[in-house]
Each structure stands twice: as C-alpha cells, then as structure tokens.
Image: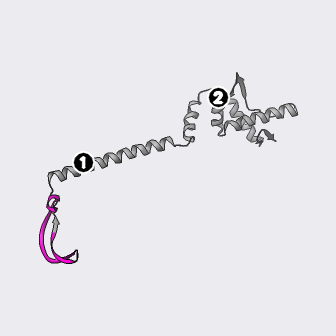
Amino acid sequence: MYEKNGFVRKKLLPEHEWHEGEYRDCWLIEYSGTGTKEMLMKNQLSLLAASLILGLSIITGCMIISNDRPAGSGQAVEAQATENKLLLTLQETAVLLGISEDQVMNIMKAENSLLSNDGPFGGTKIPYIKVDAQFLFNKAGLLEWIQAATTEKRVYSGAKMFK
C-alpha cells in the first residue's frame, strides 16, 4: 500500500512495534519522491483546485471591500466633477463645504431668520437661488462666503446663528 504512494521499504525491524497488545515486525520506509502517475495527477489537480479557490477568494474579497468603501472616497470624485460648474446643487455644496446637506439647510435657515427678525443682515449670506424646488449655489460666491464667515467667526447651531 505505501509503495503505491512513493515509499520504499528500507529495513525490516523485527518485533520492534507495539501493535494491539503485542510486538510485531515492522518496516523502516523511506519516501522516494516518485509515485504512480495517478498520484501525480491527483496532486496536480489538487494544486490547480487550490489555486482556483484562492484566486476566487481574493477576487471576492476585493469586491466586498470595494463595495464597503466609505462614502468619503466618492466625495472626491464628485468634487472633481463640480470643478467646472458655476452653480452647485445642495448635495454638491455639502460635499464642497465638507458638511451634511441638513447642515447647509440649517445655515440658510439661520441666516434667513436673522434677516427676518433683526432686519438687514450686515454680513455675507450663503449665496443661493431656488429654481422650482431645487436650491442652487453660486460656487464663486460660496468661496467668498466661507472667507467672510471664518473672518467674522460665525457660530451656527442648528437653525440659529450667533455672532
């Protein structure tokens, strides 16, 4: 049986092996490295199957990781797409400012409520227009608004602004 798998009998060891309650003769065997063609074919097929499974596992893992990427990497692509546009959507504005859409809306509400409650607003308001139900923001005006808001050290909390 061992000979089929490439082992060769080297030396008989009389009564040196304890087996089922008695000493028995046994053979000292050595692996010769040569097996039958069937064994070599099985080894090659096993190696091929293992390589295929490993390759599929790596591909599947990469696909899972790419689908679980955080949204931040997609924001960089969106920011590049908005580079040449003059008017930005609410979502694009939020990406440009690095805040959520709700926070952009709260800033708009805070500045409008300050304007309606206290009269004229002396600072620069976030620049937007409303077309149908969509808010569009002037990109150049946004950059100026950021500069003014940081210079004046404005504080926005929810839908309120504190000077």
Residue 79 at x, y percent in the picture: 58, 34
Q: Furthest-top residue in view? A: 132
Q: Amino acid at mark 2?
A: Leu
- Label 2, secondary structure: give it: strand
Give the residue at mark 2. 88
Residue at image position (17%, 51%) is 38
Q: Earlier in the sequence, mark 2 or mark 1?
A: 1
Residue 17 at x, y percent in the picture: 19, 76
Which image quarter is the N terminus in? bottom left
- Label 1, secondary structure: give it: helix
Q: Quadrant of residue 121?
A: top right
Q: Nearer the viewer, mark 2 or mark 1?
A: 1
Q: Amino acid at mark 1?
A: Leu
> Does 130 sit left or right of 8 as displayed?
right
Give the residue at mark 1. 45
Residues under labels 2 and 1: Cα distance? 58 Å
**Is residue 14 in view?**
yes
Residue at image position (35%, 48%) is 54
State the extent of the magenta-drawn residues as a range. Answer: 1-28
